[in-house]
Image (cartoon, coloured by chain):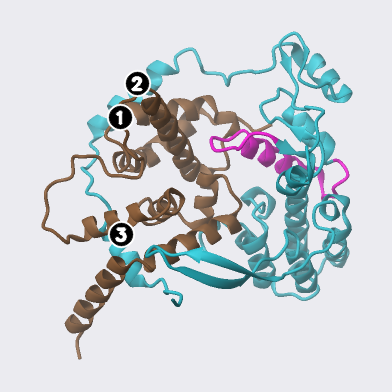
Chain colours: A brown, B cyan
Amino acid sequence: MADPVSKREFADLYAATVRDILSYLRRRTDRDVEDLAGEVYVIAWRKRTAMPEADMRRAWLFGVARNLLRADRRQRDRDDTAIQDLTTHPGTRPERSAGATEDIVAEALARLSPDHREVLRLTAWEGLTPAELAVALSVRPGTARVRLHRARQALAADPQIRDLVDRRMQVLAAEAPD
Amino acid sequence: MGRTLWTDGHDRVLWEGAPEDRPTTTFDTEQIWHRIEAATVGNDQPRRRVRTGVGAVITAAVLGTSAVATAGFYSSRTGEGPIDAEDRRLGGPGERLDPAGDDYGLVVDDVTKDIPFPDAASRKIAIRNQVADAQGPAASGITSTGALRGWVADAAVCAWANQWAASTPDGNTADRAAAVEAIMAAPSWSAVFEIDPEPSNPMVTMDVSNADGTTTTERFRDPTQFYYLSQLGSAVQGRNESRVAELLAENNGYCRAGLVPDIPAANPFFVGR
């Protein structure tokens, strides 16, 4: 059976990861993310005998946060409150000019399947490696890599993303020294 | 429509497309920490699911009692197998186990006893990892003895590969020979053979739906779970440690840090790759 994580180790884990967990939650819900983050760590503390080895704990916490958000969404659906896809950004986004990168990316992500969307955001926004992605999603590393590959292909095939990348490459080429 | 390659440009625009986030202050993190402390007061010890004492746990595990065996004790053993061929294909052969059971660690230990490890310590690590995985936050619930045995066999291969890596540069021919022999024999372990009797690496065709509504037909390799063992068996007969590590990191998934201290790159989480 796993040795429980000590209080000292848990406090260190909290200090090292809480900012990342808060960012993850803010990008996915308009709820009180401080409350949700607190719940993530309370659950983590209660499950500390099941916690994986040190190098996998950050990814494991993303898995806890992801499950908590899903449970929260199910509860909200049941309560018939405003249903907001976990994958959509909360309504606090500031006004920006049409065609801003964030809008184009958000729209393109919204056209993907929820699974593809989450895989891309966990790797690109939260910085998870494919191996960490496997822990967060509770799948084998090979499965995580295949899912990431397919999600990337789906996003790269989006016409608006193609245009955006082409324009960005043209700008970079023009700025490059001869 | 042809395949669109993923480039650094895609990584860049996806990163730049992340919603803006406000900085987290020390006040924020301290407030959350206070909430956590308040919620966990009196919960310094991990919650114990076992309520009837060790004797009862061991008895139930030995007897293979299903469901609620004695007052307050819940066994991982369900006594049920796959309901049809599809269930067997997806979930693996053998009895269905519930990782939420009080005796899950004992059951994992019991049903994997025949899988050879180089030593008791590595076996203990593998069992502990299985229990942690199955009871983790994203665990998917019921598992099968067949699937479980396959994962533990993967871990055993990691442990033997570690012995190979430790003994090869040391000139410890006996340990190296034992490791090579074990890895070569792994395809015939019953835990492996039960779920992958004919390892292969077929080319398969799949239709992929694109974002613009078109469909692309793609062809790719789809190796069976233990196909990599034949490549690993060839690799350990040489001395190319990086090749052995690469095969394990790509195909195994259970070479956790504690199992492969002498060949750390076999761990898919190894940072220095």
Nearer to me, A137 or B167: A137
Where is residue B8 shown, x and y percent of the image? 35, 71
Where is residue A109 shown, x and y percent of the image? 34, 55
Q: Which residue is mark 2?
A: B35
State yes or no: discs 3 and 1 in contact (Cβ < 8 Å): no
> For the residue labelled by badge 1, is the local secondary structure a helix, a strand or a loop?
helix
**In the image, which residues are magenta?**
B113-142
* Alpha carbon distance from label 3 to label 1: 24 Å
The kind of residue on which mark 3 rests is: Trp
Residue B130 is covered by the magenta coloring: yes
Subunit of mark 3?
Answer: B
Residue B253 is covered by the magenta coloring: no
Nearer to me, A74 or A170: A74
State yes or no: discs 2 and 1 in contact (Cβ < 8 Å): yes
Q: Callout 2 environment at 10 Å: few (<14), some (14 to 19), or many (20+)?
A: some
First-in-chain label (3 vs 2): 3
Q: Which residue is mark 3?
A: B15
